[in-house]
Amino acid sequence: MHATYDRAMQTTPDSPPPTLLERLRAKITSGELEPGNPLSEVSLAQEFDVSRTPIREVLKQLQLEGLIEIRPKVGTFIREPNRREIVELFQLKEVLEGLAAALMARRGPCPELDQLEDIVAASEVSSKAGDTDTYASQVQDFHQTLVDGADNTKLVEQYDRLMNQLAYFRLVRKTLKHPGRAVDSSREHRQILTMIQDKDPFGAETTMRAHVFASTQELLVPPTQTTLSLDRDS
Amino acid sequence: MHATYDRAMQTTPDSPPPTLLERLRAKITSGELEPGNPLSEVSLAQEFDVSRTPIREVLKQLQLEGLIEIRPKVGTFIREPNRREIVELFQLKEVLEGLAAALMARRGPCPELDQLEDIVAASEVSSKAGDTDTYASQVQDFHQTLVDGADNTKLVEQYDRLMNQLAYFRLVRKTLKHPGRAVDSSREHRQILTMIQDKDPFGAETTMRAHVFASTQELLVPPTQTTLSLDRDS
DNA sequence: CGATCGTATGTTGCATGCATCGAAAGGGTC
DNA sequence: GACCCTTTCGATGCATGCAACATACGATCG
């Protein structure tokens, strides 16, 4: 379901057409382009049927977002965060989602809260059934809805940028989850939801952070030893 | 001392010359340009002695940073966050600085910790002496050093962007501090520093967040009623 | 006198061309 | 065979020109 974190994909049917920035960003975050690949301005210009000028403007913006690296006079390359940056980003993810949980708890009833209830209920089913694919997309929805429910546009912006940098889907795709983790994770989701409903900001934040931390550990230290391949660059 | 949060100003003497992006960003964050002012591409191009093309690239990036607003086919204007956005940004500031305190506590001894010690000691003097100007710059240094000391580059990036959006200096300049707040603030700084030195991440984070929250309240709800001027837009 | 439409102007949006620089390939020498 | 210099090629960096659009102003008409 969630092929990318680019919110341009999630808008209403007749929303304005995606900008060049959004389209190129989607190509990167969706994994259509491999990391390290060179991005030629001319080839991109041909592909999107524009001249090099708007392409260059977009590339500069994507560099600011941390998705690509422009080596002056050399070329543009898709950037992949090294292990240290991934850890840094996950530390940020933890506090940002924690803040979202706290804010949502303080906010009280809202549409996102109902959505959260639905998502948690559905994910409890799929987690117990062992349907990891369905569960994975529901996890995405849970976190996304929670951040949206915080009703803080700046938080949403920073969170989206963070998730794009992580190329989260790519990490998740590489990861084979523990069989038992899904039910634990689902139980944590339920706990968080309950605390939000009970208007317990502190409890919601604390539990959310613990949950994110646990999930992060799951990703960074998977059962198999395939993580060693990530340790190549500093 | 701290005229702006643009870190390009704080690098070593013979660092590479500031880029066009940094120069234009500095012009905005320093308050040299008034909010709402139109930024003509041609006039900027003349001012920086380049053509419109690189100016346009920079403007697109500054728009992504939230510093300016580009109204298509109309013009570019310096953006000022409304009151709601300011509150949102301060909520983020709280958790980001809290995270910084926690990370620094976990990290242990480092150059930034020594700097922090010096800053706190100096600020205790100036706060008791009632030297609010000196104290204000030391407060900036305290927070900046703390974020740097967290040793998390992504945190630094997000924090800098946030402070630029807030145009923090502008807010502070508008604010007349309570006379008694400085000594309270200084005492809180000392508490935070002690907790970091004691390697108490949780205590450091909690205290830091309380401190940021208190300072924020001070800014958003000043004793005088001059804040009403901020309430004009939604 | 007021409203409306046409025009004038200033702005951005983008395509194109040239200069410049890096990196890789080729040839020569030791 | 290894190394270095030269050359070539391809890429980016930027200046410029034209088209398109939004806004403001003024003339015209009711």
Image (tube, coloured by chain):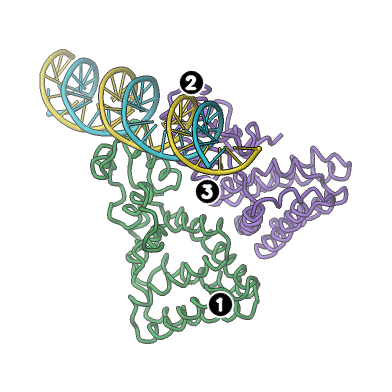
Chain colours: A purple, B green, C cyan, D yellow
Q: Secondary structure at mark 2?
A: loop
Whether labels 3 and 2 share one chain:
yes
Q: Nearer the viewer, mark 3 or mark 1?
A: 1
Q: Residues within 10 Å of mark 3 (few under 14, many from 20)?
A: some
Placement of A47 over or under B131, stated as above or below? above
Q: Are marks 3 and 2 in contact (CB under 8 Å)?
A: no
Q: Secondary structure at mark 3?
A: helix
- Residue A61 image point, x, y percent: 47, 40
Q: Chain of mark 1?
A: B
State the residue in front, A54 or A125. A54
Q: Residues within 10 Å of mark 2 (few under 14, many from 20)?
A: few
Residue receiving disc 1: B192
Q: Nearer the viewer, mark 2 or mark 1?
A: 2
The amino acid at mark 2 is: Asp
Query: Which quadrant is home to the N terminus of chain A?
Result: top right
The amino acid at mark 3 is: Thr
Q: Residues within 10 Å of mark 1 (few under 14, many from 20)?
A: many
Residue receiving disc 2: A49
The amino acid at mark 1 is: Ile
- Residue A92 image point, x, y percent: 61, 57
Q: Are marks 3 and 1 in contact (CB under 8 Å)?
A: no
State the residue in front, A86 or A146. A86
Residue A153 image label: 3
Q: Secondary structure at mark 1?
A: helix
Total number of numbered discs in the rendering: 3
Which mark is first along the chain, 2 or 3?
A: 2
A222 lies left or right of B212? right
> In the picture, residue A168 is in which quadrant?
top right
